[in-house]
Amino acid sequence: MENKKQLSPEVIYELVAYVGFKKYFHLGGLKATRELIELCHIDRDKYVLDIGCATGKTACYIAKGYGCRVVGVDILERMVNRANERAKKESVEDRVSFRVADAQDLPFEDNLFDVVIGEFITGLLDDRQRGVNEYLRVTKLGGYVGLNEATWIKTPPPMELVEYLSSIYGVKGEILASDGWEELLVGTGLRDIVVRAYKVTALSNKRDDVIDLLRVWPRVLYLYIRNSAFRRFIKEGLSIPKNLLEYFGYGIYVGRK
Ligand SMILES: C[S@@+](CC[C@H](N)C(=O)[O-])C[C@H]1O[C@@H](n2cnc3c(N)ncnc32)[C@H](O)[C@@H]1O
């Protein structure tokens, strides 16, 4: 009998690293990243930290577009390796660096960065409050902390949607509504909080997803054969519940230290 275990976050992140080199792994894509950049007042003089940077797309985009220095951290070494490859390819390695680190225990001194951002990472942490406390600790007084996070935009969400997201996508813990995220930020002492929640019209572009999967088909085939949770992800995960987008979206949350 097939083991009904969850797709582990590591397998999801592995797919991010292999399949998703070109992609953002947050809702709202580049539009949401630009909004976060604007609300956090990023310009060429700022020193920026990107938490959960994955393959470095946002970090390199900021370094290239705004000319500032950026550090990206991710818990997985393979993400950091891919991010370094990207920085070289985009000729920004003089301004961007990446390192392996846990968002909940950042290897930086207090008050170091002007801006700390995290896109679709804080919701994945075992202890979100500890994570946000760390973001604040390494931010300078007067600097900004900005998040883009999965958000219930209509509540209460039906139980089947909660279960779908946790079983298929391995979402740990509870997805919050925007007031929950706001509370988390207020709880750390951030001020001038901005909260914006958005619906999305599609979780991703299916045609691009198929092309990406074909590009890395040997890896996909290996996972399909070896990993029962991945098989379930492919079979069930792609049939997204019709009402998901009525409830599930993203939120931009920014505060000042
Ligand atoms: C959903 S992806 C988002 C990636 C990227 N921020 C983006 O928007 O495209 C989450 C990323 O967070 C990383 N991650 C998960 N837990 C982490 C932790 N405790 N500390 C640092 N990074 C973590 C994962 O390895 C993964 O690259």
Image (tube, rainbow, N blue to C red):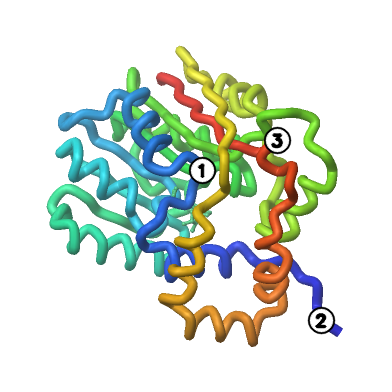
* Residue at image coords 68%, 76%: 231
Residue kind at label 3, given as amino acid type: Tyr
Residue kind at label 2, given as amino acid type: Glu
Task: Tell me the quarter of the picture where residue 255 sits.
Answer: top left
**Of the residues under marks 3 and 2, which one precedes in the sequence?**
2
Q: Position of residue 241 (x, y in %)?
A: 74, 50
Numbered tag placed on residue 27 in the rendering:
1
Asked which secondary structure carries label 1, the reply is loop
Specify the quadrant that holds the C terminus: top left
The reply to whether callout 3 and callout 2 are in contact (CB within 8 Å) is no
Judging by the rendered image, the residue that carries numbered circle 3 is 247
Mark 2 packing: few (<14 Cα in 10 Å), some, or many (20+)?
few
Left or right: where 187 falls relative to 75? right
* Residue at image coords 63%, 35%: 151
Specify the quadrant that holds the N terminus: bottom right
Whole-number angstrom distance, CA of label 3 to CA of label 2:
31 Å
Left or right: where 192 falls relative to 110? right
Whole-number angstrom distance, CA of label 1 to CA of label 3:
14 Å
Closest to the camera, between mark 3 and mark 2, is 3
Numbered tag placed on residue 64 in the rendering:
none
Judging by the rendered image, the residue that carries numbered circle 2 is 2
Mark 1 packing: few (<14 Cα in 10 Å), some, or many (20+)?
many
> How many numbered marks have been drawn onto this rendered protein structure?
3
Asked which secondary structure carries label 2, the reply is loop
